[in-house]
Image (spheres, rainbow, N blue to C red):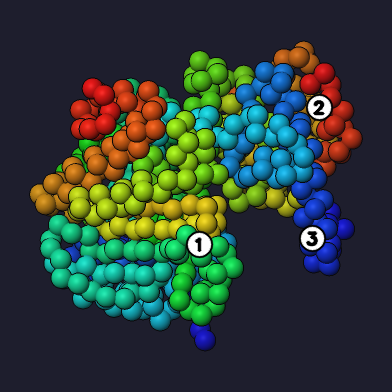
Amino acid sequence: MKKRVIKSPTGTKLQAKSWLTEAPLRMLMNNLDPEVAERPEDLVVYGGIGKAARNWECFDAIVATLKKLEDNETLLVQSGKPVGVFRTHRDAPRVLIANSNLVPAWANWEHFRELDRKGLMMYGQMTAGSWIYIGSQGIVQGTYETFVEMGRQHFGGDLAGRWILTAGLGGMGGAQPLAATMAGASMLAIECQSDRIDKRLETGYLDTRAENIDDALAEARRASGCADRSDLRARSGERVSSRRLERGKVESETRERSG
Amino acid sequence: MEKWKAKRVSDPDEVAAAASKSMAVHVKAMLGFQSRGVATFDYGNNIRQVAFDQGVKKAFDFPGFVPAYVRPLFCRGIGPFRWAALSGDPEDIYRTDAKVKELIPDDAPLHNWLDKARERIQFQGLPARICWVGLGQRDRLGLAFNEMVRSGELKAPIVIGRDHLDSGSVASPNRETEAMQDGSDAVSDWPLLNALLSTASGATWVSIHHGGGVGMGYSQHAGLVIVCDGSKDADERISRVLWNDPASGVMRHADAGYDIAIACAREHGLNLPMIRK
């Protein structure tokens, strides 16, 4: 089967009968845009298996139904499948969605997977199945807010001269260095997979890399213009990644710091 | 690294066990930093639970990011407000960015975020923007965006939504509702009421989900999206939906006894029968 590529229409020409039904149509399609979605060919938007519709047949039926939906009707979607259209009123929602809900005693992965295999359910994550995912901006932003609030609580709202130690530069963790810089701090992030560091250097989420802890700390000192070990303050805007931290070194470092 | 990659296929259980041991070391190091007075927190990846299961009894001595830093925001209904331009034109988002700065002139971190986001973050699909705002701001912004659609300042309607990770819309005891001060972490009446309220208020689409973020059995949460099509009807819906949604988050936290939420409820005149005036 030919691979389908979905993109939201743009501009002011409507496919549906009003903007109230055009909007969910466009946002459903936007969730599956190859720039937005993790695996659009499988209808997966983000988070491993978070989907926008149960299968392609359901996707096509949702689109067809939204195009015909009147301004006094409401479409019901059950785990990614359009199951009914009911007469409501102008101020009612045009779409009501329930995804992945199970009676509590059955609410586990084992039972969900059984239902998923039978085609009875879909994992909606949060904004995948509810058609309002907009890509990685949200991850950077949530991390930024967390760092800003930390600065408010501990450092009088100013993170300049402070640096954050963390680990992991994958899909979620990779947002940390950019968010730290935006919040006015610096960051030392530890990552064992070299290609992940490369990816973050390419996109400008990360400024530089070091291969071991001594170089990383030296970089932090250099950036801060401060040679005092007890006051390792990096200049705002410097993000350093250290790879291959040897366990022995981490442990000795820890003992030293906590001793 | 090569050994790790090979073992992931040949013996995934051994790799998982080794990773758990490594996480215990990691958490011990974090506890060490904390004891030296460093602000230390878990950013929502469950690392403390793994370390605890490995015998690090003090793993939960440092907090998760929600109780430490996000909850004070949730108490005021502040959360991940977002919108997208159905025109597909980035200019529409830049105009709304400017409108947000105009209407909220005194929030430096917010202005900083909008400037840096424009500079550093590429749009994916339809142009969109996120910024964290709370009760009293979301409805103002929504009405202003609707006016911009009506006047033709924006080329096409805007949709406004949010993540389900928000003030009043999620029950998730290992993340968003960790360590609620009244112990109501697992109570999921709140997100269900939130969804019903959004429906009654006239959101354009409303959703009730289970298992997002942390997996099956661990969360229930609700979402909403509302369209600014420039109509007067939309003004009415926006003023209800984008007030009630963050207000329900303030209600949830006031009910749990948070002083910030109780003060916020008072300041905004929320009618909460069991909260003393």
Identify the residue shown where x is 59% and y is 31%. B63
Q: Where is residue A56 drawn, in percent x and y?
A: 43, 78
Q: Secondary structure at mark 3?
A: helix
Q: Residues within 10 Å of mark 3 (few under 14, many from 20)?
A: few
Q: Nearer the viewer, residue A225 or B160?
A: B160
Corner quadrant of residue B50: top right
Chain of the residue under the numbered disc 3 shown in the image: B
Q: Secondary structure at mark 2?
A: helix
Chain of the residue under the numbered disc 1 shown in the image: A
Q: Residues within 10 Å of mark 1 (few under 14, many from 20)?
A: few
Position of residue B51 relative to residue B32, above or below, is below
Identify the residue shown where x is 44% and y is 63%. A103
**Looking at the rendered structure, which numbered label has been put on residue A105?**
1
Q: Nearer the viewer, residue B111 or B259?
A: B259
Corner quadrant of residue A241: top right
Identify the residue shown where x is 53% and y is 59%. B216
Q: According to the image, label 2 marks what residue? A: A254
Position of residue A49 relative to residue A258, above or below, is below
